[in-house]
Image (cartoon, rainbow, N blue to C red):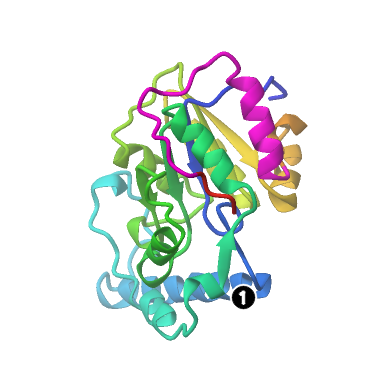
């Protein structure tokens, strides 16, 4: 797997810890644990009362892309009791807008696939930090049956962008956790293009090395990522559709 990193044709970003970072990192850990616990509890009660405690609690469903979305009532209740506005909890990762502008200006389709809940959290982040202009699709926890490291969210992101990858596509998935790397690898077995895990931060970097990828797949800052992209896209002109808007500086 130690091949030279190839220029992306599609890029999917994780959200927490990748697109935005938590002002209080411990809060992210607590929220993730509560969300995971709440999801499993809701699944357990559905398994008992709707399916008579038969079969797996979380069934393997090959038709998940067309399945009705789960309600995740416990998740919603947890986020309803959150008192702070999202900009008091998270902030854009330094340099993220520079990378997003660069990719958008070259017509690279962008999506966001997160394990976080959209309603009351992820949707607010997209709106508060003007991220909707960049992402053609945003996938959150209530949109899928199984969260990362399952590849469902990545596959759904491609579907929502109306993209069917070909063998020539190079699909970057940028994430900060071990589960992001595993989800990318799993998705690689299910799409025609080449899925490429990109580690942002220490946790995912360890996973990159454990899975046999070269350090080229590790980018510790968006300044570094922007410099790498400039080299990769050297000679590639900006899209004619690129709008001359003031660039974000966060």
**Helix, strand or loop at disc 1?**
helix
Residue 243 among magenta residues: yes
What x and y, as percent, mark residue 46?
A: 31, 73
For image coordinates 38% across by 51% down, the residue present is: 132
In this view, 221 is above or below 130: above
Q: Is residue 139 left or right of residue 223?
A: left
Q: Which residues are magenta?
A: 220-246
Q: Crowdedness of circle 1 by 10 Å Cα count: few (<14), some, many (20+)?
A: few
For image coordinates 42% across by 55% down, the residue present is: 130
Quadrant occupied by the N terminus? top right
Q: Is residue 8 left or right of residue 63?
A: right
For image coordinates 42% across by 48% down, the residue present is: 153
Quadrant occupied by the C terminus? bottom right
- Name, please, the residue furthest toward the top: 235
What x and y, as percent, mark residue 4?
A: 69, 20
Using the image as rendered, state which of residue 114 and residue 235 is in the foreground: 235
In this view, 64 is above or below 16: above
Using the image as rendered, state which of residue 17 and residue 62 is in the foreground: 17
For image coordinates 62% across by 28% down, the residue present is: 229
Q: How many marks?
A: 1
In this view, 181 is above or below 226: below
What x and y, as percent, mark residue 134?
A: 41, 44
In this view, 95 is above or below 80: above
Q: Is residue 54 left or right of residue 16?
A: left
Quarter of the figure with residue 63: top left
Residue 217 among magenta residues: no
Quarter of the figure with residue 55: bottom left
From the image, tell me which residue sits under label 1: 27
What x and y, as percent, mark residue 234?
A: 60, 17
């Amino acid at each position: 797997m130690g091949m030279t990193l190839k220029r992306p044709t599609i890029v999917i970003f994780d959200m927490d810890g990748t697109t935005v970072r938590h002002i209080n990192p411990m809060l992210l850990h607590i929220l993730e644990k509560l969300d995971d616990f709440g999801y499993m509890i809701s699944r357990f009660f559905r398994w008992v009362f709707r399916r008579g405690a038969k079969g797996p609690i979380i069934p393997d469903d090959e038709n998940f892309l067309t399945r009705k979305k789960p309600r995740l009532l416990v998740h919603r209740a947890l986020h309803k009791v959150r008192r702070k506005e999202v900009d008091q909890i998270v902030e854009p990762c330094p340099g993220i807008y520079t990378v997003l502008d660069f990719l958008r200006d070259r017509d690279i389709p962008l999506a966001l696939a997160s394990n976080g809940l959209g309603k009351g959290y992820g949707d607010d982040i997209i709106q508060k930090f003007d991220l909707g202009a960049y992402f053609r699709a945003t996938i959150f926890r209530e949109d899928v049956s199984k969260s990362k490291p399952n590849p469902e969210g990545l596959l759904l992101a491609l579907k929502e962008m109306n993209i069917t990858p070909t063998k020539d596509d190079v699909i970057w998935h940028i994430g900060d956790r071990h589960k992001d790397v595993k989800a990318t690898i799993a998705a690689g077995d299910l799409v025609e293009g080449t899925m490429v895990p990109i580690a942002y931060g220490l946790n995912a970097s360890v996973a990159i090395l454990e899975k046999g990828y070269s350090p080229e797949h590790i980018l510790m800052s968006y300044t570094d990522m922007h410099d790498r992209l400039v080299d990769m896209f050297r000679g590639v002109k900006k899209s004619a559709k690129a709008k001359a808007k003031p660039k974000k500086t966060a």
